Image (cartoon, rainbow, N blue to C red):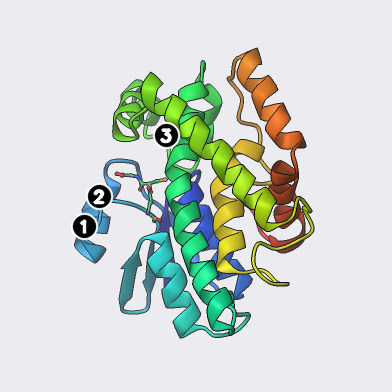
Amino acid sequence: MRTLYQFAISHYCEKTRWHLDHKGLEYRVVNLFPGLHRFKTRRLAGIDTLPLLQDDTTAIGDSTRIALYLEETYPQRPLLPADETQRSQVLELEERFDRLGVHVRRWLYGQLQNWDSVMDAMLRVYPSAFGLRDLLRPLLIATLKKLYGVTPERIAKSQLEVLAGLELIETLSDGDPARYLVGDSLTLADIAAAALFAPLFTPTGTPWDGIAGFTQETQAFLDRLFARPGGQWVLRRYAEDRDRPSR
Ligand SMILES: N[C@@H](CCC(=O)N[C@@H](CS)C(=O)NCC(=O)O)C(=O)O
């Protein structure tokens, strides 16, 4: 039995789902409730965050560690190049985009004027428990803002990081949305970049599809990102390399 413990709208969890799906591995998804998830993650892996993969008797937390575990344990459809130089480049990029995921999340949360659609996407996977789930919305919003450092200064810095990340995608792909970041096939670097940027571009069928609540100014900014080769690159990876975008 293989179990992925997750939050439905976490882009780090999406990264792990993508790895599992790419390798054709069967798994069940268990959506843990935000906050309460820590009882499980601490007990199984001594960490506070999701995703967490339980593969038979092995529990692994952190999407990068899970990715390396999957590559080592399930060699089919490899996502790490055999060539040593390319392999190091992929591992470095994977870590870089992993760090960028923090900025994507903070920037996006920082733009929301209205959290309704995000809360809907986040909470619809849990039972309503006689309305208790929805009563917790204000507490959850305040906790997320605090946990992820959603303050004006940090949002501004995260915007610069987001732009730098998109430029990196454009440089590595030579401005061509059809090209992969390293070599001629999909690698861990592509999955990390596409999954962690996906909440900005809301590919069809993903948990972020339908998220709204931005100012006109933010929407115009997002539209400009969308039109760039980097935005088109993310959408192209989803269209061509992601079979099962929602779980
Ligand atoms: N570096 C970690 C980051 C994972 C992460 O930040 N997960 C968030 C959800 S997007 C989380 O579990 N937050 C809950 C918490 O910190 O309590 C990874 O790659 O798995």
Q: Quick one: SS at disc 1?
A: helix
Look at label 1 and name its amino acid.
Answer: Arg
Tell me the residue at 65%/14% (across/down): 216
Residue 189 in view: yes
Tell me the residue at 47%/55% (across/down): 96
Residue 128 bears which disc, if any?
3
Quickly name the residue at label 1. 42
Q: Quick one: SS at disc 2?
A: helix
Q: Mark 3 vs mark 1: which is more N-terminal?
A: 1
Residue 19 place in picture, x, y as percent: 55, 67
Residue 106 place in picture, x, y as percent: 43, 33
Disc 2 to disc 1, C-alpha distance: 6 Å
Quickly name the residue at label 2. 38
Disc 3 to disc 1, C-alpha distance: 25 Å
Depth-wise, is mark 3 or mark 1 nearer the camera? 1
The answer to whether mark 2 and mark 1 are in CB contact below 8 A is yes
Task: Classify residue 163 by image quadrant.
Answer: top right
